[in-house]
Amino acid sequence: MKPAPFKYVAPESLDDAVALLRRHGQEGKILAGGQSLVPLLNMRLARPAVIIDLNRLRPLDYIKNGKDVRIGAMTRQRVAELSPLVRQKLPLLAEALRYVGHPQIRNRGTIGGSIAHADPSAELPAVLAALEGKVVLQNGRGTRTLGADAFFLTYLTTALQPDELLVEVRIPAHDHLGTAFLEVARRHGDYALVGVAAVVDWNGGRARDVRLTFTGVGGVPVRVAEAEAAATGRPLTDAVLAEVSRIVSAGLDPEADIHASAEYRKHVAGVLAERALRVAVTRAQRRERDTR
Amino acid sequence: MGTRYFGERVKRNEDPRLLTGRGTFVDDIRLPGMLHGAVLRSPHAHARLLSLDTSKAKTARGVVAVYTRTDLPEHLQQPLPKLIPHYALIHHKTQYALAPEKVRYVGEPVAFVVAESRYLAEDAAELVEVEYEPLPPVVDLTQAAQPNAPLVHEDMGTNVCAHHTQRVGNVEDAFARAAHVFTERFVMDRGTAAPMECRGIVAQWEPKMRQLTVWDSTQAPIPIRNGLARLLGLPQGGVRVIAPDVGGGFGPKIMMFYPEEILVPCAAMQLGRPVKWIEDRRENFVAMNQEREQIHVAAIAVDSDGRILGVRTNFLYDSGAYIPYGIIVPIVASTTLPGPYKIPNYHCEFKAVFTNKTIVSPYRGAGRPHGVFVMERLMDRVAKELRIDRTEVRRRNLIQPHEFPYEVGLIYQDNAPVIYDSGDYPATLAKALQMIGYDMWPERRARYRREGRYVGLGIACYVEGSGIGPYEGARVTVEPSGKVYAATSVGTQGQGHFTSFAQIVADALTVPVEDVVVVTGDTGAFGWGTGTFASRAAVVAGNAVHLAAQAVREKTLKVAATKLEARVEDLELQDGKVFVRGVPGRTMTLAEIAVAANPLRGTIPEGWEQPGLEASRYFAPPRGTFPNGVHACVLEVDVQTGMIKILKYVVVHDCGRVINPLILDGQIHGGVAQGLGGAFYERLVYDEHGQLLTQTFMDYLLPTAMEVPEIEIGHLETPSPLNPLGVKGAGEAGVIPVAALIAQAIDDALMEFGVRIAEMPLSPNRLLEIIQAARKQPAAAS
């Protein structure tokens, strides 16, 4: 488990990093927290010619307040998890981060790295999709901003061009919404068999808007529009939740692996949808009470 | 003699060193000019090796040598030694240092590359060109036992290498007259020990001294030394094998030989430079021996009161591609199965079967978890069918305290009869029931159900064979500095021998425990012995240490008597000094006595046995000693997701006299963790091509601190009459009944659905399938 030979460069500035990426293109591979890349290198499943290490780019480590909270790509997951701003404004992200590996992993892993890696089983892409957040991509010519739906293409594949660097993640502040993140993982810290991010805009005893985004059931974070519609505008009674659960299970087409069958994932996605909606609604109601 | 330390929760002598990163593991051995090896392994489970071309690899940067089978001396091209023969093992096929004309499992070594660094060695290994002709592999155990299966070893004409039967009484008669007979099929799948430290070897050849030194992460340095000397044509004194700090063994680190244990010393001798090979985790998953796969069809015959009349099991044992370790595991499984129960008639029969998978040899438990799973599941079945409380049906069949020694009627892995030496099984069960709160369980269970929760209780009993021979030895020395050294022949992989053996010596010589330096696992320090396995180190080596320490104590008094001109009977040894009773001031320290015991002039008086304050002693038990225990737990099942959560876990354990309860608790905690792994998390998944799909810790799921519950432990101490210390083994107690326990607790939690667990390990996916299938059975809810 020693990597194949590669060249290593550690740019001191964002401009240098972008220039290096432009020079090396497909041959270059970005190293952020290294939590996914390093095992792939060691198993020789990834064989980049050049590793471009971003760990000296301190300017990409920030969390800035606003209508969209802006998080620099090199912000460590643990830093975001412990950030009072994230906890207050981005409760869904704060909750989901606790499911990302273990503290040791989150101390190294970065927000941008996880999203750029685009593992559909991972928590952060689902959070970005659930909140309809955006990513900022930069190359030598400028920047562009993409929504989550345009960014995630399929398994481990995004709209990032070979010369582009993900520099910032923008997540809408959602402290006015009821949210919940739940997952079923074989062990604490594992990639979940299925996970769900539930977002509820609660008003007057019913949901004005509902979003249900699942991990582990497709090539990208998956939303089930039909289930969201079924939960919208109605009081979330046991019967309605059971209906939502059924629609979720029927509406998904996950793949099987050695840990769980497709059937299992469909079933558990339905179960989690129901449970997460209950939690999200309870939280929304509490917020409503507290702000009154 | 005082026992200041024996039985006390003494903190471990080795921990400050290990916890501050000052241990010395094989990978910490760095020698000048050292080369690094990488093994090229077969990517096929079953294939003919058509050609091997090493020319490109040999010219790659930094490469010093590339070995294929024909580069080895002729006798090392042959199958490696048969470790434990058995008359029932007709086809004792053993592995090769490098694969012959065909490969038989994924991971089998094909070539060995030696280079200036491990990186360069791995780069060059990719350049070895191998042409394979894939053959149909046989992966599934049941299929492998069929007559038309592809053959792992063609010359056998079958994959069945052993067929062994043991019988007690007349099972046919017992089943014929029984009021009830229940038959079931039980399936247990593969797992791996996954020690924190993978295997590793460093070898250094000093041609001028004709001395080979091998650092090996092994549980059995002495057999490795003896075998290497034989295979390499060196005297035993010309080979020193050191097992330094070893990061977990659990069974698989004892084998003769792993291919690398031959390749690394051979390369070092041939190249005249030290060579290191460290197994990485991905190699460990395919190249270190595995275990656990068995399929039993078992039946129990009982009278109308649930008393056992007979038990029968017929099982298949997957040995993987070769069977160097013989049929120890299935013998242990079949002889552990009767457990604490009186079984007048018993028939056990197994077939050991070759498959195109990694070799199998004992892993912590070594068949005991299988036997206990089968027996406890059968007892649960009896309780359910006859509507007798599950603890009552067990009580009715327990061997009683006055019935020891109890002869089971079987022959154990050491070829000695299975005779339980001592124990109090009813008391062990009673204590576990009290600790888990069994009396209150029906009400608690009902309360959980009213809350909509599915919570179950399990209780499982076992008897564990431990402490088998043939022998171990120890040498205890007091040096003129006053420092006390104890050298033993067994290796240490984390069991706390640096402390437990020191406690025994410290008590005998009345010195502080931290002043006793224990040396283990170095054939240069002590050259006779077998190794650490079968929960035997504390029993066999511990008693050898005890005998040697007592001999040094006697010698101390003898030497002091001469010097102090007093009779031995008037002397007292206290705080490391000898006093003449009633004569204050006439004392000698151990250091002074050590000097006196090794004079420069004069003579050695008769009766001193040897110069110096030193003695070597051996302990050879006649047969194994049998600890026992009961585990109990309460767990909750999420019937929507198949996830389980353990709410309470209790172990009551009787391993005779306890040397150090702190260390014993640790042994049990670790065992329970591995047991839980084998019950719900850990499974080696092979596809139909014999490819291992679980080759990382992302897919092979070891339970972590988050999954392992707090464990409450109760100790009973029924001394063993078979050794002076009265101790029994404790290495495997934690792991043995866990699968049986979890199965029963799940059954209990899901009683309404009529769930019946007959396989291990489970997973949330599998458990949910079982729940859903049971819920569809309308009759199940009885």
Image: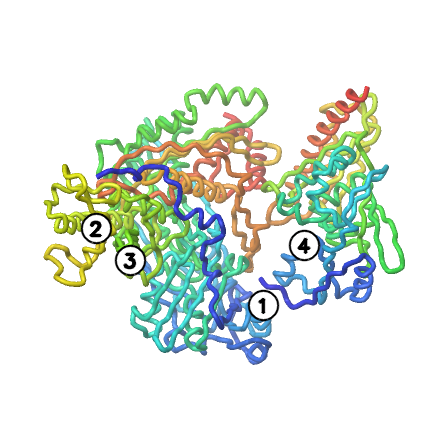
In this rendering, do the residues under marks 2 and 3 share a single chain?
yes
The amino acid type of the residue labelled 3 equals Gly
The numbered mark 2 sits on a residue in which chain?
B
Say which amino acid is labelled 2.
Val
State how far apart marks 2 and 1 are (Cα): 51 Å
As displayed, is residue B600 above or below residue A70? below
Pick the residue in front: B528 or B637.
Answer: B528
Q: Is residue B631 among what the camera can see?
A: yes
Report the amino acid beneath label 1. Tyr
Circle number at residue B552: 2
Does the residue at mark 2 contact the one at mark 1 (Cβ under 8 Å)? no
Q: Quadrant of the N terminus of chain B?
A: top left
On the question of residue B620 being in view, the answer is no
Q: Which residue is mark 4?
A: A34
C-alpha distance separating marks 4 and 3? 47 Å
Q: For mark 1, what is the residue?
A: B119
Q: Amino acid at mark 4?
A: Gly
